[in-house]
Image: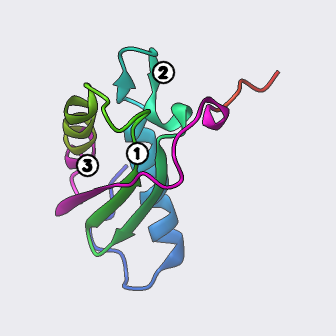
Amino acid sequence: MTRETNPPPGDPAASARREAEVYRQLRDVVDPELDLDIVRLGLVYDVDVRDGEVGITMTFTSRGCPLGPAIEAGVRRVVDELEWVKATNIRIVWSPPWNPGMIERDQA
């Protein structure tokens, strides 16, 4: 299986595949205090992929989160592992504020 490295500009299917790939990578970043990945925790608000650049809008569980820098470094590390990524831009936001209701619940 080969990976596409240069999808046609404006190809929504390719963009959706790459966004899904980024979300899969982000599930490898775990908040060690809560022992849950950041996607399941609801910390990732948006992923935008354009021309090899990945934009991630996310938050932390609190403004004073002592693990914030480590989580952000983990995000950058796992996204940059994708061979087609040229740049990773992380935007930390505080609105809406994170709350435990944002945690994905297991589907029974």
- Rendering quarter of residue 103: top right
Please name whichever residue, 108 or 46, is drawn nearer the observer in this view of the structure: 46
Q: Are marks 1 and 3 in contact (CB under 8 Å)?
A: no
Q: CA distance from mark 3 to mark 2?
A: 22 Å
Q: Which residue is mark 2?
A: 36
Select label 2 or label 1 by which is in front. 1
Q: Which mark is residue 59?
A: 1
- Magenta-highlighted residues: 78-103
Disc 1/disc 3 C-alpha distance (Å): 22 Å
Task: Say which of 47 and 86 sits in front.
Answer: 47
Inspect the image, locate mark 2, and give the three-letter code of the amino acid beneath it. Answer: Leu
Is residue 92 highlighted in magenta? Answer: yes
Distance of mark 2 from mark 1, alpha carbons?
15 Å
Residue at 30% over, 62% down = 54
Read off the residue under disc 3: 82
Q: Secondary structure at mark 3?
A: loop
Find residue 6 and report its image quarter: bottom left
